[in-house]
Amino acid sequence: MRVLFEEDGLADATQPTAHPAKIGAGSPRWRRAVLPVAAIALGIVAALLGPVFGAVLGGVVATFFLVVFPPVGIAILVAARSSLDYFQEVSVVPGPTVINPASALGLGLVLLAFVVLVLKLRARSPIDWGGRIGGLWAFWLGASAFALVVGVLRFGGGVAVDGIKEWVRLSSVYALFLLIANLTRGFRFSSRWLVWGCFAGLIVPCLFGAYQVMTGSATHNVQGVRRIIGTFGHPNPFGVYLAGLSFLGLGYLFDLRSRPIQRLVLLVLVGGAFTMLLFTYSRSALGIILGALLIWATWGSMKRRVLVLGGIALATALLLPTIAWRFEDLFVDIGRESVSGEDVSNSFAWRLLNYQRLLGTFRESPLIGHGLTTIAEVNPTQSRTTEGFATGYAAHNEIVRVLVEQGVLGLIVWIVVAFGIWKAIGELAERQSEWGVPRTGEALRALFLTLVILSGVGMGFLNQTVLLYVIFTILGALRVGSRPSVPVAGSTM
């Protein structure tokens, strides 16, 4: 690990590094592409092999690159995360212990970040704590830890396990950001490797989605229509993930103007992602795309506004007859079975009633809430599990969830963190160097604001782990790209 902390690698981000030369700087382009292409290929193979061998192979490959060329290693981990939810229902069971690969990756990121920070302290190397973004997310982790303690004190150990899992999940996002900030200093063009890692994560989920479209093997059947789930457990998180990366891909296309081959590859990935998004029939995903495009258009020129509004009008005319049935459930009366034959929780009227009941619960502890992950315990609107146990419905609204679980104080922290990060994204995008990804930063800013706004309407972006990993990876790329650096001869990625 000593190579990670040498003077020309991490100690001084303004100095050129010799590390890119080790992977072929100054050599033919095909040689420079060997390692990342091989890494992506092995990552895909690992995702397809199964939860045991695939996880081991992916871990070995990622570890190798984390030591030799950290940006690629981190990109592999981020790309792999989009495929791990597929194994949640087929988790390995050695004895009484259930291993969830997705949770294992999150815990692994936390432990890896801890090891890296300890090694840097021992080497007396400067530590990058992530600047304002890192500080804001650490602030949210502190508020969540306090809510975890509140929940344990009120409900005992019954909520402790779920609360700890949730806190570790949120911590893994910060750990990923710290790894990017501390392992990519001095590596030129790290920002592009990191961004490509996010888009490489589309490959396996989209392949699974295409297979489900062609064979009709998707498990989520609504009104006789099969909604694909890709490598996810439900169509909605799959659609939200595809919507986020499809929109970010539009921004990255502008950052690849001088790279026609890379633009073609990205167009294929984004086109495939948007096509699969349509087959998820996810209202949340469509809302994200629409909201992000409208916000992005308002920040641009009149030409951009006309193009965006014209494109939205055309897409609406073409797609509305196909997807209109997905909005029928919103208008189902409470007490009737929904049009889809599923739970009436799809009804907007039902959700308003759910919010009203949860806010009544919120008034019992308005200042600090009931504790982290306690919605299932305190929501008076309950459902029966397959085992016959009663459990409270989810909030279906991030702001309501935070109010109930963390109170007014928690909501204030949430607002400060959300809009603080949004403002920091804009500042990072404006400071991008010529090797950075400024348009991607602008797209990320619009996407993040859209997610915050929609969180008060009917979704919770903090629950979308895969999308959070993508957001904070690109935030890391923006941070890397905004650092002053001396270019290394021969590097063109």
Image (tube, rainbow, N blue to C red):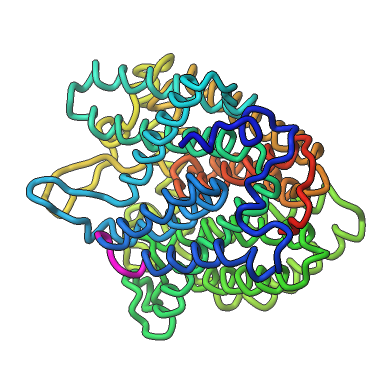
Does the image show residue 276? Answer: yes
489 above or below 372?
below
Where residue 327 sits in the image (x, y, percent)? 51, 64
Residue, far bottom: 214
Where residue 245 sits in the image (x, y, percent)? 60, 58
Find residue 204 and report its image quarter: bottom left
Q: Residue at x 54, y 53 (%)?
A: 72
Which is nearer the eye, 19 or 379? 19
Q: Residue at x 52, y 57 (%)?
A: 241
Which quadrant is the C terminus positioned in? bottom right
Which is nearer the eye, 388 or 350? 388
Residue, far left: 95
199 above or below 128?
below
Q: Residue at x 42, y 32 (%)?
A: 171
189 above or below 221?
above
Where residue 33 sits in the image (x, y, percent)? 62, 66
Find residue 81 and report its image quarter: bottom left
Q: Residue at x 63, y 27 (%)?
A: 11
302 above or below 410?
below
| Residue 285 among those drawn in magenta | no
How many tags in the picture?
0
Left or right of residue 147: residue 423: right
Where residue 193 sits in the image (x, y, percent)? 62, 54
Does the image show residue 401? Answer: no
Which is nearer the eye, 93 or 413? 93
Left or right of residue 239: residue 146: left
The part of the chain drawn in magenta is: 47-52
Residue, far right: 302
